Each structure stands twice: as C-alpha cells, then as structure tokens.
Image (spheres, rainbow, N blue to C red):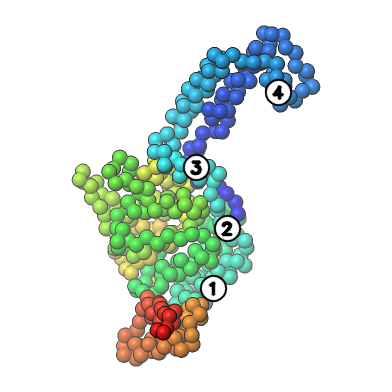
Amino acid sequence: MPRISITEPIFPDAARSESAIKDRLSHHALRLKARRTGLIIPDDFTAEEKLEHLQLHIVLSRDMRQRIARRAACIAARVDRRSPLSRLKREDRERFEALRNGVDLVALASEHRADEIAAELHAEFPWMGPATEAIWHRLRRSVQYGDAGLRLPPMLLDGPPGIGKSRWARRLAGLIGVPDLIFEATTENASFGLVGSQRGWGNAVPGRLVNLILTRLVANPVIVVDEVEKAGEARSHQGRTFSLTDALLPLLEPLSARRWTCPYFEVAFDMGWVIWVLTCNDWRRLPEPLLSRCPPIRLESPSRDHLETFARREGARRDLSDAAIDAVCTAILWATVRGHRPDLRAVVRMLDRAEGLERRPPLQ
C-alpha cells in the first residue's frame, strides 16, 4: 500500500533542526581550529573517521560551545517561524506529526477485484442496481488508468428514505478497505461540523473530515453526506453565512480539492482522493452547482422479495435462528398484505429486536 503526502510542505527539514545545525557548526569550528593548530588528517580517512579524529585531538572551549548553541537555536527558530505549523497550538502540532511520513493510499489490486466488489454489493442490495453499476464502472476505470490509489468521482444517490443508501455506501467502504464517515446533514446542517471553523472563533474546531484523516491516516476514505438536500446554513453576527453545500463545492471539484485549505489549521490538504457519496430524497432541492458536480443516480424502493432476501442474508450473518428470521419475514409479508410496505430501516430494526431477544439471558 503506497504512502503519499497530502499536505503542503509543512514539516521543517530534519537537516535544519536545532541539533543538526549545532552539529554542523561544531564540526566547522573543529576544522577551523585544526587548521590553525596545524593538525594533519590523513586523506584516506572517511568522513566519519575525519570527524572522530578531530573530536579526539581538538577540544572546543566552553565559550565556543555556548556560542554555537545560541547560534543554532537562533537559526532553528527562524526556520520554524517560516513553517505553517508555527501558527498552531502545541497540541495541534503534535497531532500533525502523524502526517510527517505521509498517509496510506488504498488501491484495488485488479479489475477482477472491482468485479468482486460490484457482485457483492449487488447480491446484498439488488434494488440499488443503478448505483452499483455506476460504482462498478468507476472502480474498473480507476484500475485501468493506473492511478496510484483508488480515485472515484463523487456520486449522488437519490431515492426514497429508508432504502439503504447510507448502508450501501458504508458497505462499499468496507469492501474497498477504507474508513468511512457518516455526516448527517439534517442534524449538522452548517459547514462547521464537516470542514471545521476558522481559528480565532471562541468555539473553533477542526472538521470531522480532517480529524478522520489525522486519526486513520488514509487518504481516500468514504465520506457519506446523508440527506444533503436538508442542509441549512449558519449565519454569524456579522451576517456571514456558512452553508454546507457551498463548503462541499470545492471538495467535489477535482482541481480545487487537491489544494483545499482547512479553515481551522490553515494548511493546504490534497483532498482529491476522498471518495464522496451524497444521498438525498429529492434532488430538485439541491443547487445547480452541486448537481453539475454530482449528477443524481435515481433509485427505487426495495420490493418485498428484496426485503425478505436481505432479512435472511443479514439474519444468517448475525447467526440468528431460523425461527427468528422466519418471524421477521412473516412481519414483512403481513405489512405488505396490509398495504404498508416496510423500508430497509424498519427491517433492520426488526432484526435488531430479534437479535436482542435471542441474546437476552433466560430467567433462572
């Protein structure tokens, strides 16, 4: 799995650290003193042997060592002030140390693996066929292009509530082998929760997107923005608005995403690898700029057969008894007969209830 750097050059060169500068200045002082004293160093010595020879025969005075230490500290402080990290608090700088060696970039081994992922998704979510077909072609295309890692364009899943759009996206993340994040636009309808707020505000914090990358150290996680059409906007006392959809636009555009600046850390990140899956119930409520980046993929509700197949498959995965699975399928049938087709969310709740009853210890 390759590792890449996803930030602008923010870490000072190790060769320009205070200790490295101090060592070079000390070595230079030793050579100058050796020249003045006439010390001869054999030409066939290696660089390390020459340094050992100098240190063995030349001793720097206490005053000289102190001058070197002060000079090294002054140069290192000047270098440090030029780094974007100098603007951050100590705890934030410590968090950024995790990015010094880069982050993992997950890739698919072959087009065959893309076929396997699509087949697994279709087996579990057959009613999500249009979304599965779209992601299948995108997975294969990424492998064909020879990308260093899996790079997918953003997608917008449009369909009735409760049909499993977010569940499908999380399953996609699991099959690819990357972390996922569900961002509920109905409860976190401003941009702060996802992308963060600018430092200087009393409640300024980094967003969940950057936090996920700092924590999991993966460049291409799956980020699910659920019910994006219900996102609102926050307004400051100065009249500035902070809309979630507006904040998403530069992240969904490939060129701007590769130089996206975090408002809290004020550091540029390469977010061009992030895999975005947006869900909505009515795409017509979304702004045109967002739709131009994510054309909606229309999905329909699962049929009764789909729900029963899902219940049996998921029940077997949870190791439920045949009687419990049959009870859930009977409930689906009766609801359909009465004209109330349950959605996937209701079926999952029934499975949760059945699992809770089976795991409950019996009364003694």
Instruction: Answer few, some or many: residues within 10 Å of disc 2's Cα (few below 14, many 20 plus, some between 14 and 19).
Output: many
The secondary structure type at the circle numbered 2 is loop
Residue 56 relative to residue 138: left or right: right
Residue 132: mark = none
Q: Looking at this view, is 352 or 201 the one in front?
A: 352
Gap in angstroms between the C-alphas marked 3 and 4: 33 Å
Residue 181 visible somewhere in the drawing: yes
Q: Amino acid at mark 3?
A: Glu
Q: Which comes before the other along the chain, label 1 or label 4?
A: 4
Which residue sits at x=34%, y=73%? 161
Residue 107 bears which disc, if any? 2
**Labelled disc at residue 97:** 3
* In contact (CB < 8 Å): disc 2 and disc 4: no
Q: Which kind of residue does numbered mark 1 sit on?
A: Glu
Q: Is residue 248 above or below residue 228?
A: above
| Label whose residue precedes the other's in the sequence (2 or 4) | 4
Q: Residue at x 57, y 49 (%)?
A: 3
Closer to the camera: disc 2 or disc 3? 3
Closer to the camera: disc 1 or disc 3? 3
Q: State whether residue 40 is above or below residue 206.
A: above
